[in-house]
Image: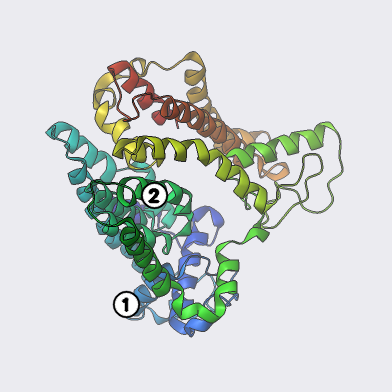
Amino acid sequence: MIRSPSAQNSTSTDPSPSNNVQRFEVHRNWLAITHSLPISKWYYEDTSEWTLDYPPFFAYFEWCLSCFAQYLDKNMLIVENLNYDSKSTIFFQRFSVILTDLVYAFGVKRCLEALKISNKYQKLTGTVSLLFNVGLIFVDHIHFQYNGFLFGILLISLAYILEEKYIKGAFFFAALLNFKHIFIYIAPAFGIYLLRSYVFNKNVREFWILKIFKLVFVVGACLGLSFGPFYDHIPQVLSRLFPFKRGLTHAYWAPNIWALYNFIEKIATVLLKRSITGSSTSSGLVQEFEFQVLPNISPLATFAVTGFMMIPCILAVWRNGTKESFLKALHGTLRTWLQAYCCESSIQWGGGFRDLRLSTCEKLYLLGIPILTLYEYLLQYLLNFDKKLPFLPLMLCSVYCALGVLYFYVNYYIQFLFDKRGDGKVKSKKDQKVIYHKIKLT
């Protein structure tokens, strides 16, 4: 009921980028590719700039959808019909997202059952907060993606692991990676926890080599089913899944540490009056850029930094070996949601802004968000900056949110690493408020 009107109100056939036609075209093109071309050409087709760059399981998913789409409008399945957005096409794409949200709903149900929350009010609050997560509704049903479907698979995997059904949990997580490889960043936490709590757990009465064989078989089976049909094209598939030529932050900066790195480079270039040869990081183009002041960041360097930042967290999971430490290590998935919405539900349902006990710095940060919005929708036009500096609103938003994300990340990491009990549980109501408001801030 909530998702349907959200999708309907955001539907538009206006080809302007502001109306999210880009996202529709991405998935329409993938429907056309998987339906019209032999499987050997799926990862080579480049008629559209929105080439297929998700793992094979998602490509099979698009093919399944295309089998139904042909009965509504066959023209959407023609590769050459770029930016095709008939009402039937948009209706089908919107409905497919709503339908696959059933997987997310099932995942929420399974995970809350696995957590064994005895308090009915907390369980109800958790259910409502997860099912009606505003951010997820915006991204999937107004912007248009299938994140609910993917998070549903993640929650099912977590539920099985919490229930100590490790092989089933490993299977669903391996399947998830073959749907969308962005989840690979939490794979180390899964791997270490499975080794700690299953393979080397003496309470599980099986020979450890047999346990490893089971895990390897399950993961290998998923990889075989996924990549098997593309055996002769693995290099091409991998080049699509890891498109390093798109640059450090893509055309639009995600709010992370590299957005701050780009921002520092931009400011330094202006202050030092360096001439920019070619396109800059704020040109909105998808390509690699040469930094004029700061060192260039290679793909290997990003892997190294990411891996290094994971080490303390992974070691903590290995040392503690508890379900709580594992869930907290996933950072930003189920545990953070439940701590925010369940453990301190009294704040959300009437505690008010003062009860969040935000510091002065945090309050000022929150007050800056409406100022950014005011600039984007009003001030830039009054100042005639919309033509001179079209990328500025996006850059400011990315950098500002990156500061908030980094602040939360550091605070969360410190709280996780210095929890001496290692069970991840919060001692006092004050501690619950601290965790809650930092998550809420993000």
Numbered disc 2: secondary structure: helix
Query: Residue at coordinates 54% horizontally, 73% vertically from top-left?
Result: 82
- Residue type highlighted by circle 1: Phe
Which mark is in front, 2 or 1? 2
Query: Residue at coordinates 42% horizontally, 57% vertically from top-left?
Result: 144
The earlier-in-sequence mark between 2 and 1 is: 1
In what quadrant of the picture does the C terminus appear? top left
Counting from the top left corner in percent of width and height, residue 320 is at 36, 35
Q: Does 243 sit above or below residue 256?
A: below
Q: Residue 190: which disc? A: 2
Numbered disc 1: secondary structure: helix
Q: Which residue is mark 1?
A: 68
Q: Is residue 384 visible?
A: no
Q: Seen in the image, is 245 located left or right of residue 429? A: right
Q: Does 349 sit above or below residue 325?
A: above
Counting from the top left corner in percent of width and height, residue 273 is at 86, 36
How far is disc 2 from disc 1 in space, using C-alphas? 35 Å
Return the residue found at the far front.
Answer: 207
